[in-house]
Image (cartoon, rainbow, N blue to C red):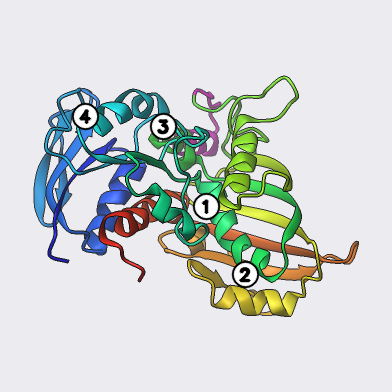
Amino acid sequence: MSKEFNVAVVGATGLVGRQLLEILEEREFPVGEARFLASDKSEGEFLDFRGDALLVQCLDEEAFTGINLVFFCAPAAVSARFGPVAARAGAVCIDLTDAWRHDADVPLLLPEVNPQEIAQARGKKIIAIPGAAAVALALVLKPLHDLSPLRRLVVTSLQAVSGSGQSGMDELRVQCGELLNGRPCEAKVFPRQIAFNCLPQTGSFAADGVDNEEAAMIADLRRLFDFPELKISVTTVRMPVFYGHSAAVNVEAQGALDPNQARAALTVAPGVELVDDPTAGDYPTPLDAAGRDEVQVGRLRADASRAGGLDLWLAADNLRTGAALPAVRLAELLLLGSEE
C-alpha cells in the first residue's frame, strides 16, 4: 500500500474510537497524518498510535482541513452536526453512529453482506455502517439467505453494557461493588439496576411499545438485504456483561433450511466462526467472542414447530466485530479497492 491518507477519528478517546485505532494499526491501514478529535473534556490527552503518543485535539469546524477520511465514533448528534462539515472539506466520512443510517441518500454498507453497493457508494461523502447487533446478525444471516431466501426472523438480542459507552461499564462495575459489599446501589445510566439483572430495554420506547434499538435493527437488516418486506420481530435486552452482544435467533426461510447445509455454509462464510458442538460444551459466549474478529455461531438445530425453520445462537464483540472492524474494512474497500 503505497498511497497514504490523512485520517481523523472523531470520538477517538471513547470505547469504539480506541478500538478503531487498534484495528487501523493491526491492519496497517496507510495512515499519513492521524488526527484525533474529541470534546473539550478530552482535549490535551494523548493516545498511542503506531508507537507514538499523539495529542487529542478539540473538535471544531476547522478540524478537517487536509483530511481525506473521517471516522465518526462520537454521539450521533456530533456526527449529524460535523459530518456535513467534514464532507464539505473534501473528506470521506464513515459514520459508526445512528445519525445517518436511515437517511435514504446515505449508503448503509457492510462489505460481507452488500458488497455490490460499494461501487454506488464511491463518490459519496457520508457512508453509514449498521449498528453492532445488526452487523452480527447480518454476517450470520447472509449465507443462510443465500441458501434459501429469508421469510421471517424472531430475534432476542442480548446486549453488553459497553454498548452504552464507558459510563455504562462504569455503572455496572460500581453497582457490582456496592451490592457485593452489602450496600444499596443507584441507577444513573440505565433506567434500573443493571448489576445481577437484565433489562428488556436498550433505548426509548415508542407509543406502540417498540424500543428504538429494536426498530433500528429491523430497519438496518431490511436495508442491508434490500428486502423491505422481510418480517422481523426483535426484543433487545441489556445484560450485565461488559463486552459482547449475543442473540437467540429463529430463522424461517422460504424453502427448506437444513441444519447441516447451514453449518457447511457458515463454515466458509466471511466474518463468521462456527462453534457448534454442544455435547462437548462447545458453543459461543460473549466472553469467548470478546477480542475476536469473527461472529461466533452455534446451537444450530431445526425448528421442529414448522418446516424451513432453524434456531441458532451467536455472540460477537460489539466494539470490534460490530463497529470498528467493519468501518475499517469499508474504508479499505472504498479507498484501496481491497478485496482480501
Q: Are marks 2 and 4 in contact (CB under 8 Å)?
A: no
Q: Are marks 3 and 2 in contact (CB under 8 Å)?
A: no
Cα distance between the residues tagged 1 and 4: 29 Å
Q: Secondary structure at mark 1?
A: helix
Q: Amino acid at mark 3?
A: Ser
* For marks 1 and 4 on the same chain, the one whose residue lies earlier in the sequence: 4
Q: Amino acid at mark 1?
A: Val
Q: Nearer the viewer, mark 1 or mark 2?
A: 1
The one of 130 and 212 positioned closer to us in this rendering: 130
Q: Which residue is mark 3?
A: 167
Q: Which residue is mark 2?
A: 283
Q: Position of residue 111 (x, y in %)?
A: 44, 58
Q: Secondary structure at mark 3?
A: helix
Residue stretch rendered in magenta on the structure: 172-188
Cα distance between the residues tagged 3 and 4: 15 Å
Cα distance between the residues tagged 3 and 1: 23 Å
* For marks 3 and 2 on the same chain, the one whose residue lies earlier in the sequence: 3
Give the left or right position of residue 213, taking residue 54 as reference. right
Magenta stretch: includes residue 205: no
Q: Residues within 10 Å of mark 4 (few under 14, many from 20)?
A: some
Q: Amino acid at mark 4?
A: Ser
Cα distance between the residues tagged 2 and 4: 40 Å
Q: Secondary structure at mark 4?
A: loop
